[in-house]
Image (spheres, rainbow, N blue to C red):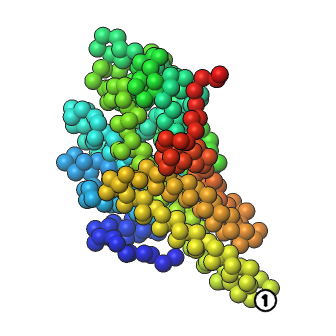
Amino acid sequence: MYIDDRGLTEEQRMMRETCRAFVNDHVIPFIRQNWQREWIMTPDDRLPRKILEVADEIGIRTLGVPEEFGGTPLDPKTRVQTFALIAEEISRGDSGLADKLVQVWKVSTLLKNIAPRHLQEYWFPKIVADPGFLLAHCSTEPRGASDRWLGYDTPETAFQTKAVLKGDEWVINGRKQFVSNGYDAKLYVVYANTKPGARMLEGTSSFLIPRGTPGFTVARCNETLGGRFMNNGEMVFEDCRVPRDHCLAENDALARRAGHYSRPGRIIQASKNLGIGIAAFERTTDYVQNYVQGGRILIKHQAVAVRLADMATKLYAVRGLLREASRAVDEGSPDADQLCSMAKLFASEEVLKVCQHAMELHGGNGIMLDFGIEKLFRDAAVFLHMDGTVDITRFKIVKQMFPDTAGAYAGPES
C-alpha cells in the first residue's frame, strides 16, 4: 500500500523507515516461520527475547521514557502522532509485539507525568537497562471493565480492589484481570479504591507495585483469541504492602491518567489495528496478482477487484480519522477525547471487515493456520474489546458530544 509521507517531519520519516526495516527483517520472518509458537501454552516460550533486544537497539522500546534517563527523544508537539506512526508499523509485523511495546510507552509516559521524582530516578534506568523489562497498567476487574470507560461517577461503580493506609504502608487487596503484559511485566500501575463510599472519581488511587512484592501474585496468563505474542494476565493482591510514597495519585487517579494514558492509548489502539489492516491488504494484493483461478489471475475477476477497492478505501478512511485525532491530542484540542473514541471505534470495525475480505479472497488458504491470513483476522477481532468495547465506545462518544442531555448509564437500581 502507498506509504503516505505527507505532513511527517524528517525525524518521523527516519523513525518509520527504521521501524519498517526491523519489522520486515526480523518480525515478519519470525512470525511466518514460527506460526506454531503462538499456540504454545507456556507463555514464556512464545516470543524470543531477541526480538525485544533488536527493538531496544533501534530505540522503539523506550519511546515514552524521558530522554534524561536514556529514553528515545520525541518532539512534544508531535509525540502522539509519532506513537501512532510507530505502533502501526510494529503491528504490521505482529499486533502482540506491538501490545508488548506500547504498554511500555504508555505507562512510562504516565510515570513521567505523575510519579514522584525519586521513583522516576529509581525505575527509569532499570527499564532502559533491560530489553525485557515490560510494564503493565492494571485497571480491569472481574466486576468492572469497559463500563468504567464511561466515567461513571457513583459509589456503586468504585473499584473492588481496595487500599488502606496503615502507618507508612498501603495495604492492597483485590484482583485484576485482562491486563496487557500482566503475565510477564516487572512493574505495575494498579488502581484501587481508597475512599469507601465516595464517588468513583473522588475515591480512586493509583500505586506503583514491582513484581515480587509480598502479597502480589500473578495468577495466570489469559489465553486470548488473537494478539497472542503479548501475554495477557490476571493478578491477585492479598494484604500486599507498598510504601506510602508508591501512591502515584491519591483519590484522583482516574482524572490524572486521562491526558497521559487514556487519550494516547486510544490513538495507539487504532494505530495497531490499522497496522493489521495494512498487513492484510499488502498480503492480499500480492496474492491476487499472482494466484490464478478460472484461467486468469484473481485481480482480473470483477468481484475480487471490488473487494480490493473496499479494503483500500476503508484503510485510507481509518488513517485519515486517526491522523486528525492524534493531531488533536498533540494540540490539546477540546474535541480530542471525542475524536480519539471515534478513531478507536472506526478502526475496530473497519479493519475487521478488511481482514474478513482478505481471508475470503485467499479462498481455502485463508483459513489455514500455516498460511497466516486467519491470524490477522483473529488479531483484528480482539480490538472489538480492547480499551473499551465498541458499544461502550459509542456511548462514550455520545456523552462527549452531548454531555448535558445524553443518558446516564449507571447508578443504583430504582
Please report the residue visible at 27 percent of the width from the left and 59 percent of the height from the top: 77
So how many labels did they put on this image?
A: 1
Estimate the x, y position of residue 264 in percent, counting from the top left.
Answer: 40, 50
Left-right relation of 214 to 376: left
Image quadrant in which you'd find residue 32: bottom right
Left-right relation of 300 to 133: right
Q: In the displayed structure, would residue 192 be above or below residue 96?
A: above
Q: Secondary structure at mark 1?
A: loop
Q: In the displayed structure, would residue 279 be above or below residue 260?
A: below
| Nearer to the camera, 323 or 51 | 323
Asked if residue 163 shows in the view, the reply is: no
Asked if residue 144 shows in the view, the reply is: yes
Image quadrant in which you'd find residue 108: top left
Q: In the displayed structure, would residue 33 be above or below residue 249?
A: below
Q: Kindly give the residue lying farthest to the right in the view shown.
A: 294
- For label 1, the residue is 295
Please report the residue visible at 73 percent of the width from the left and 84 percent of the height from the top: 302
> The C terminus lies in which quarter of the figure?
top right
Estimate the x, y position of residue 203 in percent, counting from the top left.
Answer: 41, 23
As shown in the figure, which amino acid type bears the numbered disc 1?
Answer: Gly
| Nearer to the camera, 292 or 384 | 384
Left-right relation of 200 to 37: left
Please report the residue visible at 36 percent of the width from the left and 45 percent of the height from the top: 259
Please report the residue visible at 53 percent of the width from the left and 42 percent of the height from the top: 405
Left-right relation of 66 to 45: left
Estimate the x, y position of residue 41 in percent, counting from the top left.
Answer: 62, 42
Could you classify mark 1 by the number of other residues whose Cα lies within 10 Å: few (under 14), some (14-19), or many (20 or more)? few
Q: Kindly give the residue lying farthest to the top in the view shown.
A: 167
Estimate the x, y position of residue 238 in percent, counting from the top left.
Answer: 48, 17
